[in-house]
Image (cartoon, grey):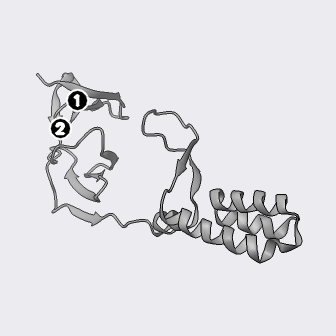
Amino acid sequence: SIDIAYFGIKEVADRSIYGFIVSRDGAIYTLNEGYGLTKFDLPNIDIDKHSVMLMANLFYWMVNVTTPESCTYNVLEAGTLKQHDTPYAVAAVSDKWEKTSAWLFPVYISLANPHTDYIVPVVKCNAGKAFFISFALAIVYLFTFGRKRTATQRITASVLIALLGIPAFIASLIFK
């Protein structure tokens, strides 16, 4: 009677649960003995954007629902899967490294590709902020640190610094 989006087989030791089902509208169910369904007393999830982690003991189930905005911790009673306590939500904190790296690295490699489930290296470009700093470093290198090198070496190093940013600047200072 439900439109299944996900079905996972996970038989527990006492064989009271055979697996978990997530419907297309985001409701989560257990497949029980006798092939009955028990619905979790949780708000529906978005199966494309949310992740769910389950932990259980004989008395309670802890169900963590992680969204891009927050992580909500739900405690459900083991027998009925009804809410035992008020859910506790923790807001997501923006990653300071992501903000800082946008200024420091004009080009970088990421292993997260939104178009596939496989790990694929993708070259990403931070247009704007990082190129401003990289261009300034290239100018500084060209007219100060690179004076002891040939014109070809200075120009090549300056172009690399403008494209690759601080790592290329440091490498140009170290290597001759």
Residue 164 placement: quadrant: bottom right
Q: How crowded is mark 1: few (under 14 residues within 10 Å), some or many (20 or more)?
A: some
Labels 2 and 1: the sequence-earlier one: 2
State the residue lying farthest toward the bottom: 144
Instruction: Identify whether 73 is placed above or below 3.
Output: below
**Front residue of this view, candidates 63 and 127:** 127
Q: How crowded is mark 2: few (under 14 residues within 10 Å), some or many (20 or more)?
A: many
Structural distance between the alpha carbons of marks 2 and 1: 16 Å
Q: Where is residue 160 in the image (x, y as percent from the top left)?
A: 71, 57
In the image, taking residue 103 as reference, residue 11 lies left or right, namely: left
**Front residue of this view, candidates 175 and 31:** 175
Q: Where is residue 49 in the image (x, y as percent from the top left)?
A: 30, 44
Residue drawn at (57%, 70%) of the image: 133
State the residue lying farthest toward the front: 151
Label 1: which secondary element: strand
> Where does the C terminus fall, quadrant-wise?
bottom right
Label 2: which secondary element: loop
- Name the residue beneath numbered marker 2: 27
Pair 2/1: label in front: 2
User: What's the mark number on residue 32?
Assistant: 1
**Front residue of this view, candidates 31 and 169:** 169
Q: Where is residue 101 in the image (x, y as percent from the top left)?
A: 53, 64
User: What's the mark number on residue 47?
Assistant: none
Residue drawn at (33%, 45%) of the image: 51
Could you tell me the amino acid type at mark 2? Ala
In the image, taking residue 57 as reference, residue 148 lies left or right, namely: right
Q: Do the residues labelled 2 and 1 touch (CB within 8 Å)?
A: no
Could you tell me the amino acid type at mark 1? Asn
